[in-house]
Structure formats: C-alpha cells, structure tokens
Amino acid sequence: MSGRSYRPEGIADEFTQGARGGETTDAEAGPAAGAPPSGTARAPRIGWRGMLRWTWRQLTSMRVALMLLMLLAVAAVPGSILPQRSQDPAAVLEYLGDNPTAGEWLDRLGFFDVYSSAWFSAIYLMLFVSLVGCIVPRTIAHAKALRNRPPRTPARFGRFPAQASGTTSASPQAVTDAVAQHLRGRSRWLPTFRVDTADDEARAARGRVPARPAARTVAAERGYLRESGNLLFHLALLGLVVAVGVGQLMHYRGQAIITEGRGFANAVVDYDTFESGAWFQPESLVPFSMTLDEFTSEFATDGAAFAQSRDFTASVTVTEPDGSASEETIKVNHPLVIDGSKIYLQGNGYAPEITVEDAEGEVAFSGRVPFIPEDQLYTSRGVVKVPDVTGGLDQVGLIGYFLPTAVIDPDGSARSVFPSPEDPLLVLEVYRGDLGLDDGVPQNVYRLDTENLTASVDEDGERVTLLLEPGDRVELPDGLGTVTLGEDVPRYVALDLRHDPSLGWVLGFSLAALVGLTGSLFLPRRRVWVRSWEHEGVTHVEVAGLARGDDLGLQPEVDRTLAAVPELAPLPDPVPTHDPERG
C-alpha cells in the first residue's frame, strides 16, 4: 500500500507526469532496425531461478492463501465423516471389516488418520508459508510508508473529486496554522491526519511566463490504520493457524462413565475413551481423583412440558494430589475446572446392578451395567456379556431395556411413562454362543452382534423375555443359570474432560482478527491538500481531497477543512485561481 500509487487514473502532478508533447514512443516508431519481423518475437527464457521466483510469488499471493485456506477446510471433511484411529480404533476396524476393498485404499491414503497424514500436513504447512510470505513484505513496506511524509501538494486541484475554495482576510500563514491544527485533531498521540506544511515557492513555468506568486500549502493524509488493520487481520489469522496446530498437538480429551458412590483417577487407563495430540505426555496429567457422591435430576410432572428435564446436578468429591478434598458440583453448561482442564457433564442414565450365576451357582458376571437412554422418558438400552457360563462351551449375551417407570400394556408389551425411577422394570432377551470375547478384538460394550448367536425360545418357538423388578432373581432358559437385579438402581454420569492449552490464544487471535477486519473495512483512506496565497490584499484558499475507492465522506471532510479557515468570507465572483503557469 505505497502512498506513491494512490492517485486515480487521469490525475498526475507536474513532478511525475513528465513532458510528453511532441515525443514519439518506440511503439509508434515501429520496429528497430535489425529486429525480427512482426509475429516472430519470442519470450525470453526465465531459467530455473526465474521459475522459482515466479513460484514463490504465486505461493505468497493472497489469492493462493485463500485457496489453501479453503482447501484445508475441505481436507478436514473426511476427518469428521470417517472414523479416526486416534479417537475410535474399534470403529476403524469395524469399517475395514465392512468395506474391505474401499477401506484398504482409504487406509493407504491416510483417511483414518486425516489430521496426522502427510497430505493434510502439507496443506497446513503451505498455508503457513503462504501467509508468512504474504504478510512479511507488506509489513515491511507499511512500516516504511508510516515514516514517509504525506505526498506533496499537486499543482492543479481541478481534477480532484472533492474541492472547495474561499477567501479570508487572514494571512496565508494563519490559514496554514489553523488548517493544520484542525486536521491533526485534538489528540497529540493519535492524530486524525498526518500533516506536513510547506512553502510553495515562486517558480517560472519553463521561462515562458512570469513566476507565479508564492503560496503556503498543507498536505495531510489519514487512513494508514486501514492497512494496519488489514495486516493485523492477516497476522491474527497466521497466529490462529499456529495456535490451532499447537493445540492439536498438545491437547487431550477423555471420557469416563462413573456411577454413584464410585469414581476414577485422572490417568489414561481409567478413561473409557482417551484421545490426545502427538506431543502429549501421559505423565503431564495432574493425578487427581474424583468420586460421584450423588446425582439428582428434576423433570416436569405436568403441562405441555411433561417429562422434560429441568435440572441435572452431579455432586462430586475431588481429591487433589496433596490429599486435600473438596466437594464440587457439575451442571450442564457449568463445567468443573481443575488445573486448566474442564470437566463437562455430557450425559446420565441408570446403571442397574446385575448378577449372573451359571448352572453350578458360580458368579459368572456381577456389576453395574450402564443403560443408554433412547428417548425423553429414559427408555434405556443395555447389553450384558457373560463369558463361559457352562464350562467354557457357551457365552451368554443379555440384551434389553431398562424402564424407569414401567407400564405393561394389555398386549404384554412394556414401556416407560416417566424418566424418574418410580416403578423400574428390566426387560431382557437371552442369546447364547460365541460372543467373540476371546478373539482379542476390541468390542463396543453397548452393542451385541446377534448374527452368529442363538436366541433362547420357549416351547412355542417364541423368544424368551425376562422381566425383573428390583430384587428379583429369575432362572435363565436352557439351564444357563440365573440372573438377579439389585434392589437399588444407581445413577451414572458421563463426564468429558478436555484440556487444550491453545484456547486462550485462539480467543485472543480471533478477537484481534475481528478488530483488524473491522478497521480494514470501515476506516477511510483520505488525502487532503490546502493551498493559500495572497492576491490583491485578499487571501485565497483552495482545498482538494482524494480517497481510495468510493468515499461518501470525502466532500464533507473537504468542507470541514475549509470551514476551519479563520475569518472565512463569501467567495468573490469571479474566483481567481492559482494557475501554476500563469501565476
């Protein structure tokens, strides 16, 4: 944004226009002697250095930077559609099993590790280089322009889009001082215009006419903050790219499901799922522990909002590494902050305690099983996987629903009518066979693949459905043993711990980018020139203005500048002009 390329087409001063009259250009004179005939000219070879220079200029252009930014957004789409190994390796294995041909090619191309793939990193680095190469030269040029004086006052004002003129009884020096003070504004440290005053000394016009009278001039310029805002926006964008990249390398996130009366420690092995960046170190985790003391929920009991949630509160006890304990609460949208990490309440449900004994009375499974709510009434689906209940020959899978407030319809089907555990009921179906628990392949604990399993049926060939209320013990079909539902129905919460050291930087750079963009869009870039000279005892004043682009406020700016002239009088008719060749 050099100040010397500011004037629009058709406006040129006498010190840049040059003498053109009577001259003949090379193009008008025709080809020089010995030159090849028309149509046979060849472009010079630029060589490998020229090719590198051209490539660098293309890469560091703002057009290419915007294209790379858009390409980066498009390249991130597969990471949100396809499962990623860093987040869900089991889902990746499942996808590869379901799509062996396409999955193999996608795996080769890195679509299951998008954010650490070579092609995504290449786009990211090219965007970084493009922004640096675009911003640094502009910043240097802008810093130099800030130290330059405003451009000299042009010889003629007639071609400028905004003009004003008048007369005064004050001297040219007084006019110059008053106008300069007006343009600088009231602030000494943040002036409105950069102002330069000078004497327009008497000069002869190529010796053909007498010298023109001397005049006092004021050259003022404002709007460099527009370019500063533009640079701030792009610097903030660069900082945002770096902050997001560093955040992805250093962040970690873990999810854990805990039931009432139990807890977990802040260690990788204690989380149900855990993902982290490449620079994460497990020993960097703060070794605190947390226990869920109680979980309470409130639901609407009447009206149009029946069964809608009103409040969820998890009361926890946090034990710090030094052994000190504190009681805290976690609510929706009110996370618990521990050492820069935020713990969010992501979900909740019921985790009935289920015990399965084999035919010999040995306990094959015992524990609290989280059931995942599927609707507003907390109709919850869950799975129990029991290994080897009959001497290692069979494995048992129980799949069904937990109904907090159950109602059995006349046709024998059961449903929940309220989210709170007013009359809980557990409904289970029984499967037997090989659950794949010994294959060494990770499984989804909330899903049971029944394709290769045998469903238990009664004498009529109908699937056996077990109904259990709290404290009930029911025989499993086919002599597989018994299943018992505990008397209490504990609640569970799903906690999500997130730590990203770049969030503060991302916020700061985003705000800086917003400020810079606002300045680059709304700060006007203007130049104002004032010339005053004395003629027959009266001081004549001319004001002209020029703006970059369309600026509706340019003429009012020129009018305000003229109004700052002391003792301004009505303009005489005709108005003498300061002709640089007539004087």
Image: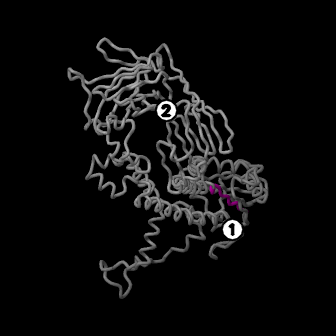
Camera sees residue 579: no
> Which amino acid, by three-letter code, is at mark 2?
Gly
| Image coords of residue 293 (percent x, y) | 59, 30
- List the residue tagged with mark 2: 347
| Image coords of residue 98 (percent x, y) | 28, 46
Numbered disc 2: secondary structure: strand
- Residue at horizontal 53%, vertical 34%? 345
- List the residue tagged with mark 1: 212
Numbered disc 1: secondary structure: loop
- Within 10 Å of the Cα at label 2, are there few (<14), some (14-19), or many (20+) other Cα atoms? some
| Image coords of residue 404 (percent x, y) | 44, 20
User: Looking at the picture, does residue 275 appear above or below residue 402?
Assistant: below
- Residue at horizontal 56%, vertical 58%? 159
- Within 10 Å of the Cα at label 1, are there few (<14), some (14-19), or many (20+) other Cα atoms? some
Question: Residue 178 colored magenta?
Answer: no
> Which amino acid, by three-letter code, is at mark 1?
Arg
Q: Quadrant of residue 583?
A: bottom right
CA gap, disc 1 and disc 2: 85 Å
User: Looking at the picture, does residue 459 appear above or below residue 212?
Assistant: above
- In front of the other: label 1 or label 2? 2
Q: Give the magenta part as a residue range.
A: 216-224
- Which mark is first along the chain, 2 or 1? 1
Instruction: Please tell me which residue lies in front, 81 or 96.
Output: 96
Instruction: Please tell me which residue lies in front, 309 or 22.
Output: 309
User: Looking at the picture, does residue 553 appear above or below residue 311?
Assistant: below
